[in-house]
Image (spheres, rainbow, N blue to C red):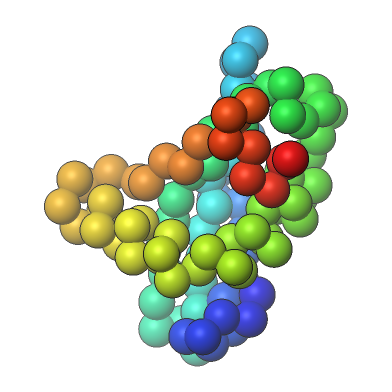
Amino acid sequence: MNTPRGIYTIANARPLERNDDAAVLTLSLERADGIEKVALRFRIATGLIGAADSPEKLINRIAPWLEREFEQTREAALKSIRTERKLLVISFDTTHPGPFA
């Protein structure tokens, strides 16, 4: 993924978690030179995705959105890790479908 801060790789950091109403995807974003690594979670309403969608398919859908929203998302993820000691969770549902519109 090309960003103003350089090239970042997106990787699935944990197994996809599913329940009746959503899937939770934990991603790791790492700068190509290894100087920075950030993790965050995406909660995606079941109605926006197929039951058989793999983490790779979800990453492919999220990547263009993440590239556009990179700076704001990166800052929010780092702040959440530093101040709240937990991963940022971004939710996509019928009201805010994000890349799943």
Tell me where residue 72 appears, x and y as whole percent. 41, 64
Q: Which residue reaches farthest top?
A: 20
- Expressed as whole percent of the image width and height from the top left, the position of residue 34 reads 46, 82
Q: Residue at x 64, y 59 (%)?
A: 65
Q: Is residue 68 above or below residue 8?
A: above
| Along the line of sight, the residue nearer the viewer: 12 or 96 | 96
Q: Is residue 24 visible?
A: no
Residue 95 placed where, x, y %?
58, 29
* Quadrant assignment, res 55: top right
At horizontal 81% and vertical 35% (from top left) the residue drawn is 53
Which residue lies most toward the left here? 83
The C terminus: image quadrant: top right
What is the quadrant of the N terminus in the image?
bottom right
Q: Residue furthest front?
A: 95
Residue 12 falls left or right of residue 38: right
Q: Residue at x 25, y 58 (%)?
A: 79
Q: Position of residue 51 (x, y in %)?
A: 80, 23
Q: Residue at x 44, y 50 (%)?
A: 40
Instruction: Count every numbered label the image shows and give the total.
Output: 0
Q: Is residue 82 visible?
A: yes
Residue 38 falls left or right of residue 79: right
Whether 67 is drawn above or below 28: the answer is below
Q: Is residue 30 above or below residue 99?
A: below
Relative to 26, is 72 on the left or the right? Answer: left
Which is nearer the eye, 69 or 56?
69
